[in-house]
Amino acid sequence: MQEFYAGRTVMVTGAAGFLGSHLVERLTAAGSRVLAVDAAPVPDAWAGGRTGDGSIRYERLDVTEGAALGELVREEPVEVLFHLAAIASPRACARDFARAFAVNVEGTHRVLDASAEVPHFVFLSSAAVYGAPVSLPMAEDHPLRGREPYAVTKIMGELLVENAVANYGRRASIVRNFNAFGPRQPTEYVIPSVIRQALTTGRIELWSGAPVRDLMFVDNTEDAILTVGARSRGGTYNVGSGRGVRMAELAQLIAAKVGHDIPVQDLGKEVTGSPALVADVRRLQDLGWSETVPFDVGLARTVDWYRG
Ligand SMILES: NC(=O)c1ccc[n+]([C@@H]2O[C@H](COP(=O)([O-])OP(=O)(O)OC[C@H]3O[C@@H](n4cnc5c(N)ncnc54)[C@H](O)[C@@H]3O)[C@@H](O)[C@H]2O)c1
């Protein structure tokens, strides 16, 4: 799958973010030239916006600006476009739905529209679209019951992609990502927040220990996204491990990695998201993907990174 990317030009929106920055690094390691787009300033690691060997061209651009995007895509022979730019925090989407709609829905329309000639469009959606489970694990035909602001914007984004496929002949794939974790994830997400609490206060307070999530180390997630980009002819793919972990159990695992005497307190508060999200990943496995970094190893690496 890595060989597919050698010598190709690939565009990544949301390139400065958690998943985007790992994806850009994986692509350049595989020999791609990357057109990296994000509204945020260029990350320190890619100072100047171009690496010395020209493998990354970084453009600071808001995806809601269609004309600028169109110009950029015309300048480069992009073969695969990974659209990750989004207001990715469910809390931020709830706080400012107008902005979430502008970026996650209108922005997706602008990127699709500007990239009509790009042979393969890959949209990063979320398991949040499934909402409360009817059955577990969730296959791609599970009903889309997510009604939180973030989930609603991702359902609308998926419909825009399906419109492009059905009515404009686009080759496009949808990645429904469950929960990735690893170095560089913002600390408002559950794993970094629990690790940070354990490291800084010596105790863990959990909002609720009840929810079950499908948590996967970021290297495996990037392998899966790259596999979809290289091998999918179109369609929707769950990206996850297929394994559910209860938040209470996760906190105990992190406590054990940080130090044995870390107390965990479950505040037992009400959660707004789905009570359980676990992926059925058979369709992704049929593309030739498998998880290579075990959960425990990924968690240890993540704890070490935050410790550092
Ligand atoms: N991290 C996960 O576990 C996870 C799970 C499910 C889905 N996803 C999806 O994957 C994608 C990447 O998620 P992430 O965790 O890396 O999030 P992130 O917040 O770290 O990255 C998102 C990036 O998008 C950029 N961005 C926001 N608005 C923009 C705009 N108007 N124009 C250009 N860039 C803009 C941000 O600056 C940021 O760098 C998102 O679409 C997210 O919804 C992530």
Image (cartoon, grey):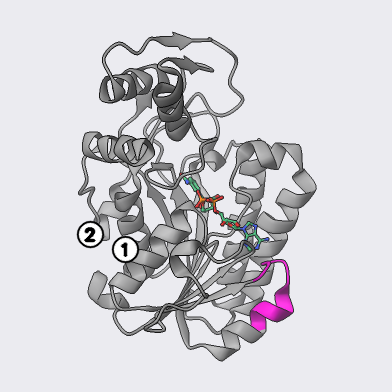
Query: Are the two marked residues, 1 and 2, in contact with CB atoms closer than 8 angstroms?
Result: yes
Q: Earlier in the sequence, mark 1 or mark 2?
A: 1
In this figure, which residue is indicated by the disc labeled 1? 227
The location of residue 301, given as percent across then percent down, is 27, 40
Residue at (33% x, 65% y) in the render: 26
The location of residue 258, given as percent across then percent down, is 30, 24
Callout 2 secondary element: loop
The location of residue 176, given as percent across then percent down, is 46, 49
In this figure, which residue is indicated by the disc labeled 2? 288
How many residues crowd mark 1 within 10 Å: few (<14), some (14–19), many (20+)? many
| Residue type highlighted by circle 1 | Thr
Look at the image and tell me in which quarter the C terminus lies.
top left
Classify residue 153 as left or right of residue 296. Answer: right
Residue at (52% x, 38% y) in the render: 130
Report if residue 62 lies within the magenta region: yes
Q: Is residue 166 visible?
A: yes
As displayed, is residue 119 above or below residue 139?
below
Which range of residues does the magenta coloring cover? 61-70
To which quarter of the image does residue 62 belong? bottom right
Look at the image and tell me in which quarter the N terminus lies.
bottom left
Residue at (71% x, 37% y) in the render: 94
Callout 1 secondary element: helix
| Residue type highlighted by circle 2 | Gly
